[in-house]
Image: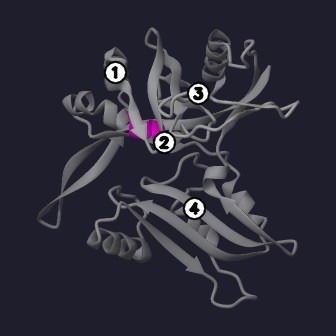
Amino acid sequence: MADKNFMSYQMDLEYIDTIKEKDKKKEVYKSKWDAKSFKDVMLKLYQLDKQDRKRRYSGWFMYLEDLKVSGTTSLSGRFRYAEYGYKGKWVHADSMEERDNDKSLREGEEQYVYFYFRLSDGLLLLQGDMKVTRSKVEDYISNIGKEKLKNSGYDNIAIRTLLREDFHKEIEKLDLVKLIEVEIQTEKTSSYENEAVIEAKRQAAEVEANYASVILRSKYRQQGLKNIGQYLEGFKPRGSKTVASGVKNIKVIGDQNGELRRVYLDKIAEKYTRDLETDENKQLKKERVHTALNGIGEMREKIWRE
């Protein structure tokens, strides 16, 4: 048996729309959930040859290894990945005996990351992992499924972290807030853009950067930032489980009971922990994982969308 965490996310499909602004046309990113198009993308992706399904990163690769369709309700499966490019001797954990490693430098030990998509509202449950993260899944589907997405009228997919509703409560515990840093994806528009955000995006556009950061730092060591609650609500509305479009992360540094404390938005993600059965090689049993994820998907309330 092994305890595994599954993080919650909101899926969206993104497209470029043209709006009229002061007698000028402007292209903006928009997003929505389209279950049929997303299902078609995933099925098309899974039908590709294994080589065409593979996406290579620095020193490792991943691909969609399994996909299970449950009618119009959900898609579930797993990604397979492996790290390669390094070879050392095997060392026994108990005896400390060493032996040569006969694997090729192009070979890697397989690892699996399980997922579940709820088609009714775009809920994603993704097993916690250091390699196959939210951003990697977003990148993988957007790139490997690029042709099918384009044919359906979309540019890419977006995966946003669903949060426990206590982000603002965690901030309110701080006695003093010394620094706020907001990371913004420059191509995305937000309903909240103050002068600092607009200027950060402008500077990022000049150097063709994909991301910009807005950093607010207290002027004096013994005095904290003021009115931070109202400021942060523009990026992460109070009571909402998602952040404003384009906000990638928020970091807040302050003092609590005389100790330095950091609060990261992406560390307050909604997650579910399950004790799952493993085989003789300590790999999770696939059907047990599917059963657990289906159970979470059935009990988790519907994602609220505007």
Frontmost of labels 2 and 1 is 2
Tell me the amino acid under the disc marked 1. Lys
| Pointer 1 residue | 36
Farthest residue in the bottom direction? 220
**Which sits earlier in the primary sequence, circle 2 or circle 1?**
1
SS under mark 3: loop
Question: Looking at the picture, does residue 31 appear above or below residue 34?
Answer: below
Kindly check if marks 1 and 4 are in contact, taking CB atoms under 8 A apart as contact: no
Under mark 2, the amino acid is: Gly
Q: CA distance from mark 1 to mark 3?
A: 35 Å
Magenta residues, start to end: 135-140
Which of the two discs, 3 and 4, sits closer to the camera? 3
Residue ID at (72%, 87%)? 223
Q: Which label belongs to residue 250?
A: 4
> 206 or 19: nearer the eye?
206
* Spatial separation of the CA atoms under disc 2 and disc 1: 34 Å
Q: How is the image coloured?
A: one colour
Q: Which element carries disc 2, helix, strand or loop?
A: loop
Residue closest to the eye, 191 or 41: 41
Say which label, 3 or 4, has the lower sequence index: 3
* Earlier-in-chain disc, 3 versus 2: 2
Q: Residue at x 53, y 31 (%)?
A: 82
